[in-house]
Image (cartoon, helix red, strand yellow):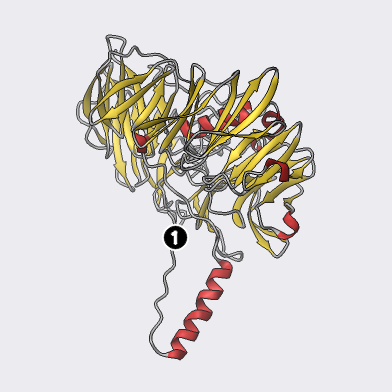
Amino acid sequence: MFCPNCGEQLSDDAQFCGACGAKIGENNESAENIANVGNTENVAVNQEEPQNTADNGITAADIANKAKAVGEEALNKANAVADSATAAVKKFVPGVNKTILLIACAALLVIIVVAIIIIANLAANKPSFSFDRVPHSLYAAENDDGELVLFLDGKELKNSDDVSYSSSSVAFAYNCNAFVYGGDLYKIDGDKFTLVKEDVEDVVVSSNMNALAYACDDEVFIYKDGKETNVYTVDGSVSSLVISPNGNAVGINVREDGEYVSYVSKGSKANKFSDELEVGIISDDASIVYCGDDNELHVVKNEKADDSVRIEKTVGNIIAMSKDNKKLIYTTSGGTYYYAPGLKDDEPVRISKNGVTPIFPVGTNGLLDDFRSFLGYENYSVKKYTLKGDEFESYTVASSVSSYRLSSDGNKLLYAKSGSLYVKDTRNENSEATEVVEDLYGSSYYYANADLSKIYAFNDDDDLVFSDGKSNKTTKIDTDVDNIVVSADGVCCYVKDDTLYTTSGGSKGSKVDKMNDVTSIRLNNYSIFYVWNDDTLYVSTNGKNFTKTSVAE
């Protein structure tokens, strides 16, 4: 089963999407049925059913089954990119770059020695992760002529080929200025887009958003730097494709004469990889390739499939990968494990006996440098996991957590517990949680900016209130609010009685000029506001001034 909002692969009994927070079983599209790409709205994963969240990701069985699910996962993650979600009325939780510590050493030897000691101590406690923002988003809509209209980061692109609108998803690679829509490849040139190739299939996008790989007729191509390169001519049919983070390498799984064969390309003609193992995950230089065989998971180093090492015999899900595709977290019946080439005895390390869901801030790509130190959700608790020696150690940051959001730097956690909202420092095991909102309406009705300094929530009186995240003193903004979205810098737009309001901080909401017939509001890439007002689409980059577009119903 796949999430209807972002395309994330889910377990059949999942109630919430672990990638975007969407509630499964509800229609998460707004009334105008707009298709969205790179949609990273300010909504977190609702963790009220944590037993389901560990089921997100690529199943080893699917990898073994011709790696089909892996290819779909790679595309879906690139399309949705880490954390997209609906902005619908108070139904989902905000789940939400990187902190760099620089210490200048003086010339004196004693000071240098002291500084080195300080750095060593800090390094021992500093998480080995950093978060990358999803840099760009594409928003698709239909004009009154039934044509496709695209908005790149809020800027309208001209439809030079009169492309008809459909509900097709968009595979979008920003850094190569290209996308696939309705099975056709288009190139973005300035403020317009033009058709490059028709009947494109099996599309995957690199996690760096700089390359596309796809099949067309009996050929496989990489599209990068505005250039299309043929890497393989198929003597059979393509089963699935996978692509490395920077698009330099592609894994090709094909069916030839009734047998499945895999190939690997490093930007040029592909070479045969294996008659038995199928490529599931590939690094930029193809030095690390994860493969499936039945329910087993293998790692291949330096492209030599004959030297493959079986990591696990029976794997449940691959739930997280590092930015370089060389390290991963996966589940088995025995718990959650971490594997990285170079670990002692080249063996995986168990993180927990239970299912663990890594936590990422909203608006980021859901990839870490490493997983030697990270935050995760396990059995209603948020925990800090750290690899020390040959074992993972953990401590509980917050318990009885029903929903959560992580700050953009990973240093603060906002979470709901027993009808209240709390903020806690994630770097210090002994830090005290601060209650910031009392009498929370349910456990899902709160929103926040990237650094959690501007928090918006609904209380039991159905009031929209504001907190600065420092105490439980809140400011009432409004009541009986319908829809709400909050951007990364804390601008809040909400709809009340079909009228659009905007606010930032604890100030009263002010009406947005000429926005009195609003039917829906959405937030793309955590920064671009899209509002349907009087059957016309408006766009804003600051949540205050809205520009009328050519799109109308």
What is the x, y in percent for residue 29?
Answer: 45, 21
Q: Residue furthest top?
A: 145
The residue identified by callout 1 is 99
Number of marks: 1
What is the x, y in percent for residue 520?
Answer: 36, 23
**Residue 501 shown left or right of residue 114 in the figure:** left
Looking at this view, is 59 or 507 the one in front? 59
Name the image quarter holding the N terminus. Answer: top right
Residue located at (48% from left, 40% from top): 207
The vertical placement of 310 against 519, above or below, is below
Disc 1 on helix, strand or loop?
Answer: loop
- Crowding at label 1, few (<14), some or many (≥20) Cα neighbours within 10 Å? some
The vertical placement of 240 against 123, above or below, is above
What is the x, y in percent for residue 6?
Answer: 50, 28
- Which quadrant holds residue 502? top left
**Residue 56 shown left or right of residue 509 in the figure:** right
Residue located at (53% from left, 50% from top): 368
Looking at this view, is 502 or 168 the one in front? 168
Looking at this view, is 436 or 376 the one in front? 376
